[in-house]
């Protein structure tokens, strides 16, 4: 039989002031709340709260940022396109591209409905269309790519056909002012068709700021294509009446419910 020494203070669970293992709170993992986590937390994607729930504020910020970027891209595209064509026309073609404007009632000129908005006859002409066109392109593009292209298509074709029919034989119509008037007309009235209070408010502000442009739709100024202005604006109003891609979510949901109710009633 072996005699073991009796435990002394400080060993085992003895006095905490002695060396050894007499300090239980120093044992590993004795205080889990003070230990680093075994696994790092999974980062939440943008638009979500730390609890994994969707964050409405973050989603709204992301949506508005995407809308701004889309609008800025279309504004830049517009400015680059008209200025690039203007420079190429002056430097490489000695101004002869102006013959690709709309020449009313000439069947060979019908395809020029697509090219005439890109052509400008002078520096003053293109400068006058640059700033307002960029602003309106941004505001239309802010609603989305589909909205921008739909509105632009209505303005180009209705404005171009109207100019071709009523522009006067022997004249040549060029310039992006028809687009400018069409985009502005769309922005002025679209809120009344899609029942958007914010878009109505924007239309009122634009109407106040650009009310002077209404005189450009009336005859009387030599060298100004009032026909392109007038029918471009008509195209913008028609676009506001017809397209639905710019509808607010509430109106789109209401229209979808009506369609489902009609299908269910058959």
Image: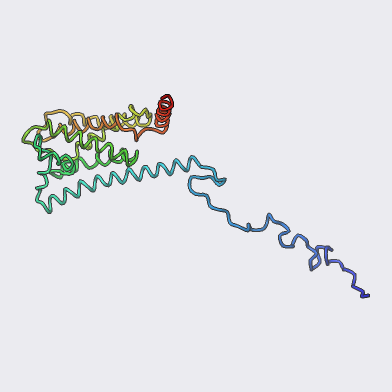
Residue 71, horizontal then vertical, whole percent:
32, 43
Q: Is residue 255 above or below residue 77?
A: above
Residue in the image at 48% along x and 47% along y: 46
**How many marks do you count on the picture?**
0
In-image side of 226 versus 19 (left or right): left
- In this view of the protein, which residue sits in the foreground, 14 or 190? 190
Hey, which residue is sitting farthest front in the picture? Answer: 266
In-image side of 123 versus 36 (left or right): left
Hey, which residue is sitting farthest bottom in the picture? Answer: 2
Residue 128, horizontal then vertical, whole percent:
19, 40
Hey, which residue is sitting farthest right in the picture? Answer: 1
In the rendered image, which quarter contains the C terminus? top left
Residue in the image at 36% along x and 43% along y: 68
In-image side of 233 versus 263 (left or right): left
Residue 129, horizontal then vertical, whole percent:
20, 40
- The part of the image, by quadrant, that contains residue 176 is top left
């Amino acid at each position: 039989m072996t005699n073991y020494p009796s435990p002394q203070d400080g060993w085992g669970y003895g006095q905490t002031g002695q060396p050894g293992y007499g300090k239980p709170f120093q044992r590993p993992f004795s205080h889990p709340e003070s230990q680093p986590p075994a696994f790092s937390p999974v980062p939440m994607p943008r638009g979500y709260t730390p609890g994994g729930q969707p964050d409405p504020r973050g989603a709204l910020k992301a949506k508005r940022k995407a809308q701004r970027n889309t609008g800025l891209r279309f504004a830049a595209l517009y400015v680059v396109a008209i200025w690039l064509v203007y420079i190429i026309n002056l430097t490489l073609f000695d101004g002869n591209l102006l013959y690709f404007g709309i020449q009313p009632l000439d069947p060979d000129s019908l395809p020029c409905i697509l090219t005439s908005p890109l052509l400008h006859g002078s520096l003053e002409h293109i400068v006058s269309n640059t700033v307002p066109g960029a602003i309106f392109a941004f505001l239309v593009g802010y609603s989305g790519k589909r909205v921008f292209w739909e509105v632009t298509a209505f303005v180009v074709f209705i404005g171009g056909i109207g100019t071709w029919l009523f522009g006067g034989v022997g004249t040549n119509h060029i310039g992006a002012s028809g687009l400018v008037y069409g985009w502005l007309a769309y922005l002025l009235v679209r809120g009344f068709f899609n029942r958007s209070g914010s878009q109505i408010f924007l239309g009122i502000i634009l109407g106040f700021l650009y009310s002077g442009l209404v005189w450009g739709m009336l005859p009387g100024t030599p060298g100004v294509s009032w026909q392109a202005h007038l029918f471009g604006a008509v195209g913008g109003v028609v676009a506001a009446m017809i397209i639905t891609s710019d509808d607010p979510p509430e109106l789109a949901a209401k229209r979808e419910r009506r369609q489902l109710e009609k299908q269910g009633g058959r």
